[in-house]
Image (cartoon, rainbow, N blue to C red):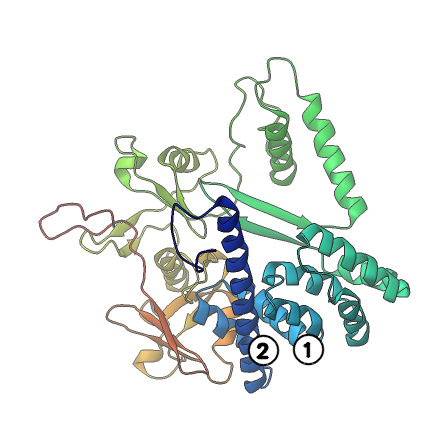
Amino acid sequence: MSELGERSDDVPEGSVLDRVREWGACLARLEAAQLRDIAEYHRRRGGAPDVAAELALALALSENQARRKLDLALTLTDRLPHTLAAMEAGQLGADKAAKVAEPTACLSDEHAREVDAALAGRLAGREPGWIRRAVTRLVARVDPGGASERARRRRAERRVELVHGHDGMATLFADLPAEVATAAYTRIDRRARALRGRGEQRTTDQLRADVLADLLLGTTAATDVTGGAAWPAAARAEVFVYVDLPTLAGIAERPGELAGHGPVPARVAREIAFGPRSTWRRIVTDPLTGAPVDVGRRRYRPPAVTDEYVRVRDRHCRFPGCHRPSQFGDLDHVTEWGRGRRGRTDTENLIGLCRRHHRLKDAPGWTFHLDRATHRFTVRGPSGQTHGTDPEPLHPPRSAGGADPPPF
C-alpha cells in the first residue's frame, strides 16, 4: 500500500479506500487531542462561563457551535473515558462521539460511566444511527425511573429557533412536546391537502409551508390559489432589508441584504420593499465609503433617532462572529455613559450588541474597544487574544473617480 497521503493513479481502488479510512482515523485522533486541550483550558480558567465565547473567537465558530464543542470535551474527559479512548485509537470521530454524549447528558455521572463502560470495544465501525439507538437503550436500562423526570425537563426546554440558510431561505425550528407537534403538523397537513385541486399548482410541501406562515402571521397566501402564490404574503414585522436604488427601481439586479441572513435576490428584495405592509426609511450614504450619514424618519426625539441610526448602521451584533440582527439586540455605550465627552449617548459611542455579548462585556478579563475614527470594534478575551470587526458599508464603496469596485 502507498504511504498515507501519496497520490498515484497506480494505487488499486481498494487501497485508496484504505487510505480514506486511515485519514478518518487520523482525524479522530486529532479531534480527541483538541477536545482534551479544550477541557484543559476550561479547567485552567476555573470553569468560567465565558470560555465558550472565547473558544468561538479562537476557532472562528458561532457561539452555539463552540458551546457544543466545549460540552463534548467536558463530557468525554469527565464522564465518558472509554468513548474518548476510542477516539484516541482512531475508531470514531467527534460526530459519532456526540451520539454517545448527547443521550447520556440526562444521566448522573455514575450512570453515564456505566453506559460508557458497556459500550467499550463496541463502537469501532458502527454508523451513527446504530450508536444512537444503542445508547438510548442503555440509558433506559440503567435509569428506568428517570424517564418521567427527563420528559418534564425536556418539555420545560421547549423553544423556537431561527436558522438562516442560503438563497434567501431560513428554517424555523420548534422543539415541542411530541403530542403538540404531531397535532400541529396534522392540522397543517389537513389544511394543505384541502387546498389541492381547483387548479392549484403548488406542491403539498409548498402548501404546508404557506399554511404554516398563514397561521403564524395571520396572512392568506395559502388560500390565494388564483396564481399559485410562490411566496407567503408580507407580514407586519420589522426587518431590515438593504437594497440600492437602481435595483429597487428594477434597472439593476444587484442582491439586497436581509439583516442577520445575508444576500437575497434582487426580485425578493423588491417584493419585500413593495409589500403592502412595508415601511420605507430614507437612508443617505457616503458614496465613497458606503457608510450611512443620515436615516430618514418620522420621529424627531433624538434618542429614537440615534437608536434607529445605530441599528441601521451596524446591521447585526458587532461581536466577532455574531450575526444576530441589530433590531433584536441592545445598544451599548462602549465608553461607560457619563464619563466625559467620550461617554456620551451618541453614534460615535454606541454599537449594537446582542444581549448575550452585551453582558459578556462585564465578565472578568474581557475588554471592548471602539475606534472612533474607523469604527473598528476590537474584543480582547481573558487569554489575551484580540479579535476585531469592521462596520460593513450599506453598498460597495466607489472610488474617487466614481468607478465600481471589484467584486472581491
Residue 9: image location, x then y, percent: 38, 45
Label 2: few (<14), some or many (≥20) within 10 Å? Answer: many
In-image side of 296 versus 232 (left or right): left
Q: In which quarter of the image is residue 137?
A: bottom right
In-image side of 339 versus 287 (left or right): right
Q: Can residue 50 be seen in this view?
A: no
Q: Nearer the viewer, residue 11 or 196?
A: 11
Residue 164: image location, x then y, percent: 50, 48
Q: How many angstroms separate mark 2 from mark 1 (CA)?
A: 9 Å
Q: Which of 20 and 180 is in front in this view?
A: 20
In-image side of 341 versus 356 (left or right): left
Amino acid on which disc 2 is placed: Ala
The residue drawn where x is 32% and y is 50% is 296
Residue 239: image location, x then y, percent: 46, 47
The residue drawn where x is 51% and y is 27% is 230
Q: Which of 88 and 202 is in front in this view?
A: 88
Cβ atoms under marks 2 and 1 closer than 8 Å: yes
The residue drawn where x is 78% and y is 56% is 134
Q: Most extreme residue toward the left, as rendered?
A: 401
In the rendered picture of this protein, how many numbered marks are placed on residues? 2
Rendered image: mark on residue 39: 2
Q: Report helix, strand or loop for mark 1.
A: helix
Pointer 1 residue: 78
Amino acid on which disc 1 is placed: Asp
